Amino acid sequence: MAVRPTPEQVLLLAPDRAAAAAASTAADPGAWSLAGCDDQAVWGQYVATSAEPYEVVVDLDAPAFRCTCPSRKVPCKHCLGLLLMLAQQHVAPAKRLPFAQQWLQRRDRHPTANAADTALDVQGAGDDEVAVEADASGVRTSTRTGRADPGREQRRLDRAERMRAGLLELDRWLADRVRHGLTDPELADPTTWERVAARLVDAQCGGLANRVKRVATRVGEHARWHEDVLEELAVLHALAQGALRTSTLPPDLADGVHATAGLTIAKDDVLAGVPSTAHWLVVGESRTREDTITVQRTWLASQAPGADGRPVTTWAMVLAFGAFGREVTTEHHVGTELHADVHWYPGGIALRALVGRVHEGPAAAVARDAHTVAEAVAAAGWAMAAEPWLERFPVLVCATPRPVGNGRWTLADHTGAMPIVPGFWRLAELVAMSGGRDLVVMGELAADGVLPLTVWAAGATVEL
């Protein structure tokens, strides 16, 4: 029999620290079905958020790994978690499952098929299947079965070069704008901004292109528009420089820069991550238009008491998109609660997420614990310090609408006040519901103030 590994030896197999941390969560016996082992291997089925459980098997002699999850890491967290359970003696000897038997038999029949003792797992279907291979040293390569695609790596390099050229051009343009001054008449010409945005789209930096278009709308917006535009240009400069130097950034921050610049992450890769399972209250929803696309943000909140008894809120933002003529639909309705797994996109802060398996619900619910204004502003400040390009952050406060003059209002309590965004068209309704008393309000806090989205009054949930 192969020597049973120790937990320390298992974690040394992890390709990075994130995989090692995730392995501890995956080593929960309750998340596995039909786990077993014998003298040569250990196997099991990991119950994930996909329709079918992931099939996991590890050849202990090589070692070699097989898992049907979409992760590109070898070994993935499921293989590591299964090995951790074996090391902790949570896996009992059993008869091999069919998928494990077939895979191990293939390896026995072709022991020299790969000099590195390759483990092969095919993901996908048809002519575009992806074959993922890993040898005993953990080196992983990807090839294509069916139609060969020898230009795939070249296309990746070409895209990286286009992005680099686009980022350098953007940064030069930003330097020219500051050098010439913001009173340059060229800034008032919409085509100036359109050309910059179009160049970024060509460079496959769509996220930056959208930000450039939003900055263009601020030119001449009010008497002090120069301050707003200069601030936005500074953020664009920080993003351009960060995207050119992601190798020097912490991994989470580098991922956040990539996502903001426009690199997309497959949903399957997100759902393969370790979820946060909790009771999530759907507290707000907002929509904005970007060209012909409608962007919908659905805000979820999970609350737990902190060490001082005050509520600690974990936020999750679920994005949905609708094209012109086909409006985005609401999947999770405000005022409901669900017990579900939430999977996080990478970034400097955990905010954007996907809802995975729903264990219970949805059921009607109301907001229970709100923060003070000072607590909400402090949380938003820490988030924006972690990701300076963050445009909005959710707040849930118990406060009273109060006038401050010149038609402006704030949400205020004994700890402070935050301005309500100018032009909020349902202000009168908000004030009427308050009647001079505190309300529980959920909104999005941005540079120009808070945009109220939902109010809880007299036990009712009102979307604004």
Image: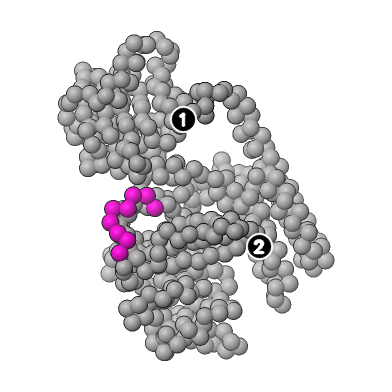
Residue pictured at 42% horizontal, 89% vertical: 436
Q: Which residue is mark 1?
A: 125
Position of residue 398 relative to residue 151, above or below, is: below
Amino acid beneath label 1: Ala
Mark 1–mark 2 distance (CA, rounded to whole Å): 40 Å
Residue type at tag 2: Arg
Relative image position of residue 81 (x, y in whole percent) = 30, 36
Left or right: 251, with 74 as reference point: right
> In screen coordinates, is 82 left or right of 317?
left
What's the magenta region? Answer: 355-363
Determine which quarter of the picture holds residue 116: top left
Circle 2 residue:
214
Tell me: residue 13, above or below residue 419: above
Q: Is residue 357 magenta?
A: yes
Q: Residue 353, percent across and down?
A: 44, 53
Q: Residue at x 61, y 52 (%)?
A: 207
How would you rate the neighbour count of disc 2 (Cα within 10 Å): few for under 14, some for 14-19, many for 20 or more? some
